Image: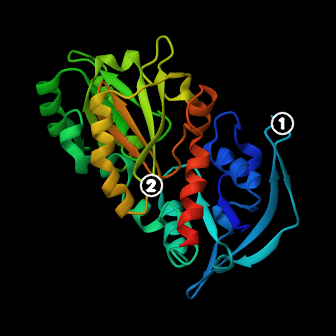
Amino acid sequence: MALKVAVQMDHISSINIAGDSAFALMLEAQARGHELYHYTPDRLAMIGNDVFCVLEPVEVRDEKGNHFVLGEKQRMNLADIDVVLMRQDPPFDLSYIAATHMLEKIHPRTLVVNDPAEVRNAPEKLFVTQFADLMPPTLITRDKTEIDLFRAEYGDIVMKPLFGHGGAAVVRLTRDDLNYGSLYDIFATTFREPWVIQQFLPNVKHGDKRILLVDGEFAGAVNRVPAAGDLRSNMVRGGAPTVADLTKKEREICERLGPSLREKGLILVGIDVIDDKLTEINVTAPTGIRAVRKLGGPDVAAKVWDVLEAKLAG
């Protein structure tokens, strides 16, 4: 049965199709005969319990520079859509939160992926702390005294904004780094929210593994090796994707997380693991689907649609 699928995303003209997971999901949906619609989150409109949006039918093709064709705009009630893929990139700000409240009105009559209420309640660098025993030592604060104490105990640390994404503003501070005071001032001026401070894991030089889970089950993985001279392994920051197998500990991490992810309706999740330590649980718009496939790994997009079609079939 053909489904009506609306994709809430950054405008499709702006994406890099080589690595965009939303695009991979769209290609797979189209291959299965589903009707695809495109919209940006600023088009959402809520009246009572109804959520309306101006949608554009979209056809996609895996051709750089010629990857989409949009049809005529039409205003629709999202209750008439079968699946909404909430795939716009962070920042996880008030605009993002407002969109989750609107989409919560239609879920689960319209299946929203991931569950918007749970996405709102599971900020990626906070949700992960529910599994603190799997993580490196981690502090959430903007208080300098607390950071001083943490730094004195663990020496080399990493600081990053709590709601940052894509490796932006992730910095390493060594025990005796004279830039610490200035860096603190920059963070305090730039970011109003608390920050994440973690013990630095030297083995990040061997890679930061992105592991994808679909409905709580392992679906694929890619190891991202930082570029020379850079701490960050994110592929948008120059990290090189390499083939990845799971260690015993990484499989145990997946098994620990799986039941909670299924319970919360977090169907597509990307976790980050460095040296067998869990660092993040990405629930908003996890990437890696295309990289896993290009390296000869599983077809994660197909796994996602297998799950969605099964849920809608009852």
Q: Is residue 81 left or right of residue 96?
A: right
Between 162 and 17, the residue placed more toward the observer is: 17
- Relative image position of residue 74 (x, y in whole percent): 82, 73
Relative height, residue 205 to residue 87 (above, below): above
Between 28 and 274, the residue placed more toward the observer is: 28
Relative height, residue 3 to residue 255 (above, below): below
Q: Is residue 168 left or right of residue 256?
A: right
Between 213 and 39, the residue placed more toward the observer is: 213
Asked if residue 166 can be seen in this view, the reply is yes
What kind of element bears circle 2? loop
Image quadrant assignment for residue 106: bottom right
Q: Amino acid at mark 2?
A: Asp
- Relative image position of residue 234 (x, y in whole percent): 50, 29
Callout in the foreground (1, 2):
2
Image quadrant assignment for residue 154: top left
At label 1, counting other C-alpha atoms closer than 10 Å, the crowd grade (few under 14, some 14-19, many 20 or more) is few
Q: CA distance from mark 1 to mark 2?
A: 33 Å
**Label drawn at residue 65:** 1
The residue carrying mark 2 is 215
